[in-house]
Image (tube, coloured by chain):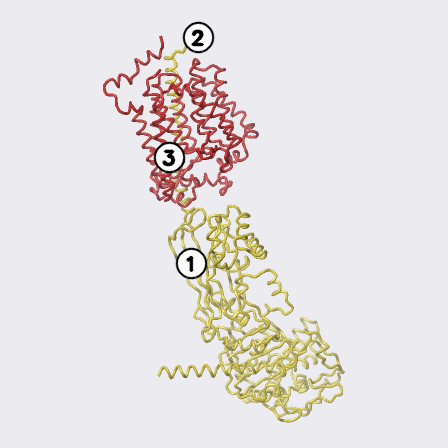
């Protein structure tokens, strides 16, 4: 039996093999059948599912950001432009190795540690992992080249060419034009998410913010076929974005430059308005900032310098700075007194340098008051009270007037309200009245409050914009034109004009003031600048500083606003006060006095005397305006000649 | 009396060849099998041409390798089967030595140590060699035993199979390990291994599956199996391959998007489109029709191969030829099942179609052996 193992029965083995082979072949057929069923399942029964999945893989709808509308000044000079920038974007979904890619990028681009931090932060707050997220705003050509060379190692990294905002005038026009900022999550919630799906910057300040709707434009789309690495292979279909509409401002950039130069290094604001149209010709707030840094990106330390500086460069003093108007308020008090019948142009009182309400201890002093009681302006009527800026006259006048008459009249000039058509964020200041005082201070209105208001002090607060409007109203002899930045108002109402200023131009105090009252006030204010060589206490307050060599007629009013209260019996000693406690210098003016083409307010923060500090600034601005107007006329005449 | 002598007189070839001995008999080539193989090779080249996406150098490279593969087929067909029988143990042992060398001195590519680099000469995968050597060794062992094999011989055969399979699994190269094991096991099945034992072993494996899961499988292998059941759990990582390949196949529909029109492959969504996942390219560009055609061709090759094996004159030759054919089937089944998402992802190319030289050469050499079985006089 042992040998049986060695004897091989070939026939039986062949049969065994054939049997096995047949069985296994059947198994093969069955298993191939399973595969066939699987393919039928995928390719027939579930075909539609996979077809759409494949299309979704391959076809992507990309949104195309519209080009933002450009902003021009009155002469067509470009204030806000769009420039090409190569930006670095990451598609989070397609980053195979996030840390590795970032390390490589940092090495290739030689990013600073600040830029690195920004990059990580943006990646973390990414809203769409499937869409390119811009992490470095502008790349240099060398950086773009290095990225191109290393492209194979950088799946999910894209260089995107796009248009970014550029402000050619930088700091000079920053507060006038405003600026755009990178959109935040909150911004995204406030806008149409479809229209803004490709937009990274939104108008955040000034004109850029208010006219966002017109400047933005409409989003476009393109269908692209892109590969697994997120690179676009071809474009299938494009619906171009429609660019935003351009804006033309009333702003005169040359005047703006001259205004900024006139203010120099000092803190303050200038607002110049064309009284005929209400158009804002210049709007300066200093110190300012370079709006381009919000676009090109800035380091954290740059930003904290900007936002925490004691001089608040981001703060728009021209429309948001609120100060006591000081003596620049006096023309309003005077006209209110005339209108209320409390005084006449001929009525005069004696100014001995101090004023007391009957039966009260407190002494209200004139600016010319001295400790030895030798101050005072002598006999003053309204005209003299304006050009000499007599405090005592206006103490007396205000104390004799019903507070409602004064406040009501002042309100017509736009004090306590924002009448600017297209700067909704402009501050309203504070026009106190008995109801306000009761509500806020829980105190009744004392006669002393009226006295203080008579010289523009007390709780009264105004912005330079409001005072420029006051100057403009007087220049127009009572005609109020709401100020506005943009010249072409646009047919569409989509931007929604400021509700508060929906009112149109109107005449102030028409029932109580005649045109000669306005004319007399203009003459009084001309005296402030032009009345000179009249001996002791006979000259306009500003004459010595700006009136000697002026070749046009300018009407003005100086103001010097106290920041801290000077105790009874003490004199104001500038040296003893800290920088931020010194007086604010004001000057409001318009010119030419007879047919004004410019009305302005100048504020120099903690600058000192209105006549000595603010008036020369105003003079420089108006000089520049006159020169620019002459140039404009000359060039339009030569154009006319050429046309003939 | 020797049964082989008896068989030789009965050999159908002699009677068939008694009149005209055709050229392909002299070349020891089976024309039908060569035609079937060539149809698959041409079909595969056309698809590969699309999958290489304009990379002419790659395509030329593959054409060159296919030429080599045909050469291997012809050479292997010339060698008389008894030479294989004699060489089988040597072949197997040297294969084992190479595998050990790989473990200690191999070249690591993509995290697996599979390659043996003989500087200045060539670089090859010894595991590829074992796809031929293991079934040869098992067939060689069973040649001298009576069939069906006893428990003892079955055990010895399993050791012959398991040692190289485990060595290859250590590289790690699960795909080749499975193929080598399958090739050896196919011999046992063809030799008449009791179905009861087979079923028992399958049940035993199922019963110990939790232990295997816990202690034998590597983390990434477990992940692959999990991914199979739920590719969406990690769509960008482990599930990516399977999602993209089923998407490619499914989007092809019944007749496909057309050659060179497959977006999944062209746009790089499909990974390994020209190697392991090329059947997805066929599915996408040529649709169900294209896949069905290929599978039909494969089935015909298997049928012809098994028929040829059945004609062989000795147990060794029959088992060897039959095992090659079944290995070929395991190849294609594992690949197609993996790409269509019914088996976990293991690195197995689609026979004769996927880009890559070694597997095409091994397979063609295997078919050469099968042909040699038929046309050499049995012994």
Of labels 1 and 2, earlier in sequence is 2
Towards the viewer: A492 or A248: A248
Which secondary structure lies at badge 3?
helix
Residue that mark 2 sits on:
A4
Which secondary structure lies at badge 1?
strand
Number of other residues with Cα within 10 Å of mark 1, as a class: few under 14, some 14 to 19, many 20 or more:
many
Numbered mark located on residue A220 in the image: 1
Residue most toward the front?
B120
Image quadrant holding the C terminus of chain A, namely bottom left
The chain drawn in red is B
Numbered mark located on residue B255 in the image: none
Q: Nearer the viewer, mark 3 or mark 2?
A: 3
Query: How much space separates mark 3 and mark 1, taking CA atoms?
Result: 51 Å
Residue most toward the left?
B19
Which secondary structure lies at badge 2?
helix
Q: Nearer the viewer, mark 1 or mark 2?
A: 2
Could you tell me residue A305's position as x and y percent?
A: 62, 64
Report the residue at 34% width, 17% height from top. Answer: B378
Chain letter of the residue carrying label 3: B
- Residue B224 visible in the picture: no
Numbered mark located on residue B65 in the image: 3
Q: Colour of chain A?
A: yellow
Chain letter of the residue carrying label 1: A
């Amino acid at each position: 039996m042992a040998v049986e193992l060695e004897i091989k029965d070939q026939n039986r083995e062949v049969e065994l093999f054939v049997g096995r082979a047949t069985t296994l072949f059947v198994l093969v057929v069955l298993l191939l059948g399973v595969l066939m069923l699987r393919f039928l399942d995928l390719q027939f029964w579930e075909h539609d599912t996979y077809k759409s999945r494949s299309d979704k893989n391959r076809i992507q709808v990309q949104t195309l950001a519209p080009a933002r509308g450009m902003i021009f000044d009155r002469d067509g000079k470009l204030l806000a432009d769009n420039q090409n920038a190569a930006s670095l974007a990451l598609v989070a979904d397609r980053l195979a190795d996030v840390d590795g890619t970032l390390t490589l990028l940092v090495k290739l681009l030689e990013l600073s540690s600040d830029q690195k931090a920004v990059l990580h932060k943006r990646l973390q707050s990414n809203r769409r992992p499937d869409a390119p997220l811009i992490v470095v705003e502008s790349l240099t050509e060398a950086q773009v080249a290095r990225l191109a060379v290393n492209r194979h190692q950088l799946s999910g990294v894209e260089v995107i060419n796009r248009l970014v905002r550029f402000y050619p005038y930088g700091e000079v026009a920053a507060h006038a034009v405003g600026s755009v900022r990178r959109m935040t999550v909150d911004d995204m919630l406030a806008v149409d998410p479809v229209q803004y799906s490709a937009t990274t910057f939104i108008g955040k300040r000034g004109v850029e913010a208010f006219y966002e709707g017109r400047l933005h434009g409409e989003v476009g789309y393109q269908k692209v076929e892109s590969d697994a690495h997120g690179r676009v292979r071809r474009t299938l279909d494009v619906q171009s974005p429609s660019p935003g509409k351009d804006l033309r401002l009333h702003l005169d950039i040359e005047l703006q430059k001259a205004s900024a130069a006139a203010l120099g290094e000092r803190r303050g604001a200038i607002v110049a308005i064309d009284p005929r149209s209400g158009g804002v010709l210049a709007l300066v707030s200093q110190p300012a900032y370079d709006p381009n840094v919000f676009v090109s990106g800035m380091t954290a330390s740059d930003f904290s310098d900007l936002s925490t500086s004691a001089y608040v460069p981001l703060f728009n003093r021209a429309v948001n700075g609120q100060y006591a108007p000081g003596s620049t308020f006096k023309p309003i008090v005077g006209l209110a007194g005339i209108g209320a019948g409390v005084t006449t142009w001929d009525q005069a009182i004696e100014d001995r340098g101090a004023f007391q309400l009957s039966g009260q201890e407190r002494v209200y002093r004139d600016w010319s008051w001295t400790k030895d009681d030798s101050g005072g302006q002598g006999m003053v009527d309204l005209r003299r009270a304006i050009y000499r800026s007599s405090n005592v006259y206006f103490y007396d006048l205000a104390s004799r007037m019903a507070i409602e008459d004064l406040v009501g009249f002042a309100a017509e000039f736009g004090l306590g309200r924002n009448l600017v058509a297209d700067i909704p964020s402009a501050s309203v200041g504070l026009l106190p009245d008995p109801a306000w005082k009761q509500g806020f201070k829980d105190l009744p209105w004392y006669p002393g409050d009226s006295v203080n208001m008579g010289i523009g002090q007390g709780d009264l607060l105004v912005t330079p914009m409001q005072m420029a409007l006051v100057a403009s109203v007087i220049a127009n002899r009572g005609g109020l034109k709401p100020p506005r930045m943009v010249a072409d108002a646009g047919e569409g109402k989509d931007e929604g004009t400021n509700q508060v200023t929906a009112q149109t131009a109107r005449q102030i105090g028409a029932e109580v003031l005649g045109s000669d009252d306005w004319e007399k006030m203009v003459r009084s204010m001309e005296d402030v600048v032009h009345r000179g060589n009249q001996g002791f206490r006979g000259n306009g307050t500003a004459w010595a500083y700006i009136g000697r060599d002026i070749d046009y007629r300018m009407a003005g009013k100086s103001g010097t606003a106290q920041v801290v209260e000077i105790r009874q019996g003490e004199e104001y000693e500038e040296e003893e006060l800290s920088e931020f406690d010194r007086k604010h210098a004001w000057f409001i003016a318009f010119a030419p006095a007879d047919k004004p083409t410019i009305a302005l307010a100048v504020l120099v923060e903690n600058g000192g005397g209105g006549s000595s500090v603010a008036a020369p600034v105003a003079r420089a601005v108006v000089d520049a305006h006159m020169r620019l107007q002459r140039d404009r006329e000359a060039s339009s005449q030569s154009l006319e000649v050429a046309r003939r | 009396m020797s049964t082989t002598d008896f068989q030789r007189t009965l050999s159908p070839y002699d009677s068939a060849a008694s009149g005209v001995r055709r050229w392909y008999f002299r070349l020891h080539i089976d024309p039908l099998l060569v035609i079937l193989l060539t149809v698959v090779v041409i079909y595969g080249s056309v698809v590969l041409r699309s999958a290489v996406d304009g990379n002419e150098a790659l395509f030329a490279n593959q054409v060159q390798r296919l030429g080599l593969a045909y050469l291997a087929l012809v050479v292997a067909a010339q060698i008389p089967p008894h030479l294989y029988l004699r060489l089988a143990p040597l072949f197997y042992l040297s294969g084992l030595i190479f595998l050990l060398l790989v473990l200690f001195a191999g070249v690591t590519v993509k995290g697996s140590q599979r390659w043996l680099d003989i500087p200045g000469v060539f670089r090859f995968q010894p595991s590829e060699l074992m796809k031929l050597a293991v079934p040869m060794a098992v067939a060689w062992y069973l040649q001298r035993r009576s069939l069906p094999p006893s428990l003892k011989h079955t055990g010895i055969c399993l050791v012959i199979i398991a040692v190289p399979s485990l060595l290859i699994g250590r590289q790690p190269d699960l795909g080749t390990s499975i193929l080598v094991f399958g090739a050896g096991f196919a011999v046992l099945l063809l030799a008449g291994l009791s179905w009861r034992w087979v079923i028992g072993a399958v049940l035993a494996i199922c019963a110990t599956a939790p232990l295997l899961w816990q202690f034998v499988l590597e983390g990434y292998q477990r992940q692959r199996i999990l991914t199979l059941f739920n590719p969406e759990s990690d769509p960008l990582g482990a599930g990516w391959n399977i999602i993209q390949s089923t998407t490619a196949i499914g989007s092809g529909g019944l007749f496909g998007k057309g050659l060179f029109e497959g977006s999944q492959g062209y746009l790089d969504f499909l990974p390994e489109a020209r190697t392991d996942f090329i059947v997805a390219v066929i599915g996408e560009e040529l649709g169900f029709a294209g896949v069905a055609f290929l599978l039909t061709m494969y089935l015909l090759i298997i049928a012809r191969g098994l028929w040829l094996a059945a004609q062989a004159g000795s147990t060794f030759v029959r088992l060897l030829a039959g095992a090659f054919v079944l290995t070929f089937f395991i190849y294609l089944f594992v690949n197609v099942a993996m790409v269509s998402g019914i088996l976990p992802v293991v690195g197995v190319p689609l026979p004769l179609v996927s880009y890559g030289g070694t597997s095409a050469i091994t397979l063609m050499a295997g078919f050469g052996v099968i042909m040699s079985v038929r046309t050499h006089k049995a012994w």
